[in-house]
Image (spheres, rainbow, N blue to C red):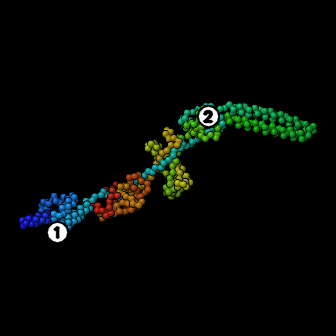
Amino acid sequence: MAVSEKSEMNGQKQRSALFWATLLHGIVKSAVIPAEVNHYISAADHYIQIIQYSPFCFILILQYKNKYSKGMRLQFITGMACLFFLWSCGEKQNQEQSATYPTMTVKLGNKMLETDYTATIQGRQTVDVRPQVSGNITQICIKEGASVRKGQTLFIIDQVPYKAALETAVANVESAKAKLSTAQMNYDSKQILYQEKVVSEFDLQTTRNALLEAKAALSQAKAEETNARNNLSYTVVKSPVDGVAGMIPYRVGALVNSSITDPLVTVSDDQEVYAYFSMTENQVLDMMQKEKQLSDVIRTMPAVKLKLSNGTLYPHEGKIDAISGNIDTSTGSISVRAVYPNKEQLLRNGSSGMVVIPSEHKNCIIIPQEATYELQNKVFVYKVINGKASSTPIEVVEISDGKEYIVTSGLKPGDVIISEGAGLVKEGAVVSGKQPKGK
């Protein structure tokens, strides 16, 4: 029994020595140790690695707690708590000391921004061609989508009834002329007889009234002839403008009239095209406050580009030539028109695109968007002040290119900010002594 008790005591002493050696190793590893002392703790390296990187070992040891005395368990738990506390503090200190962030020095520069506006494209003059008389279409003289000239014949409507009406009107004119000639002779004769006192004044006045009536009848007949000629001419439908014909919803034999729902064809004069888009009331007010007069705003507007529906840029630049004087109360927007040359007829009436308006900002502060983060609809950056990150609110221009911001307030030239990963930086984080780089 004495040998067994002695063996047990020796085991406890060994375990106690191992524990305190491990604890001492952890403490000195968390501190800065001179090189000549390192050899005293090298023997316990594998134990501290197990404790540091495998918490599972600690749980495993506790599962066999019955093999150790109460005093040994208390010493072990206390020592482990101290060890992990010191180790975590050392790790935190190392992390703070080793944190590096890319920085930049704020400078003034120039920036060109472009804003896109959805636009609807229309020809300079778009005309719905409709018939002025009713009848069946007897001939279609153009092809759909063809270029047409002003005065070119597009359709012919049945002319037979209108030719007959014209002939009738011409005959009525001739008849009215004959009646007028007869009335004139009667009046001349009555005048002679009245001078010889053969007929009374009443007879003279009656023949004069008949003459006036014959003149009126002739004028009416001539007007009907003119109307008949016009109706006949309307059976030949001609293009009112130069342009490009649209699709034709009617075919030969279709009965048409002036009240049809769909036009015979639409002709668009697209030598120049208009791009209609909308700007907000605030945007227009900002421009007007700079120039005072709407005409000055239009005159000073820069040339604008046009992005086509397939994403390519139209080869010709345009010019804003009209801004509406009315505000759409339902949307709060103002209609704007830009005009583009279209000699190649690449643009068609009714197509869509994006009007691109450039705006140049001179002597402004430009920072990358990666240097910012947003909180409650406000934009922030981290300034580097006394070697630590300090969150600073800034104001930026609403329009951006998706890569950089133009700062209007909150920063000044010479400030040093963290240029990337601002969303991952913590307030008060220690910034390394890395030299700032300008952008």
Secondary structure beneath label 2: loop
Residue flagged by tag 1: what amino acid is it? Gly
Q: Quadrant of residue 68?
A: bottom left
- Relative to 12, is 223 above or below? above
Q: Residue at x 61, y 36 (%)?
A: 238
Using residue 203 as the reference point, say whether residue 429 is left or right of it: left
Q: Quadrant of residue 327?
A: bottom right
- Relative to 321, is 10 above or below? below
Q: Where residue 356 sits in the image (x, y, percent)?
A: 46, 48
Q: Residue at x 44, y 42 (%)?
A: 310
Q: How dense is the environment of label 1, judged by Cα within 10 Å: few (below 14), some, or many (20 and up)?
A: few
- Do the residues under discs 1 and 2 have CB atoms within 8 angstroms? no
The quadrant in which the C terminus is found is bottom left
For discs 1 and 2, the disc positioned in front in the rendered view: 1
Using residue 419 as the reference point, say whether residue 93 is left or right of it: left
Q: Which residue is mark 1?
A: 71
Q: Residue at x 49, y 55 (%)?
A: 283
Q: Which residue lies most toward the left here? A: 3
Q: Where residue 256 sits in the image (x, y, percent)?
A: 63, 36
Which sits in the foreground, 80 or 136? 80
Q: Residue at x 20, y 61 (%)?
A: 63
Q: Which residue is mark 2?
A: 254
- Residue 36 seen: no
Q: Quadrant of residue 237?
A: top right
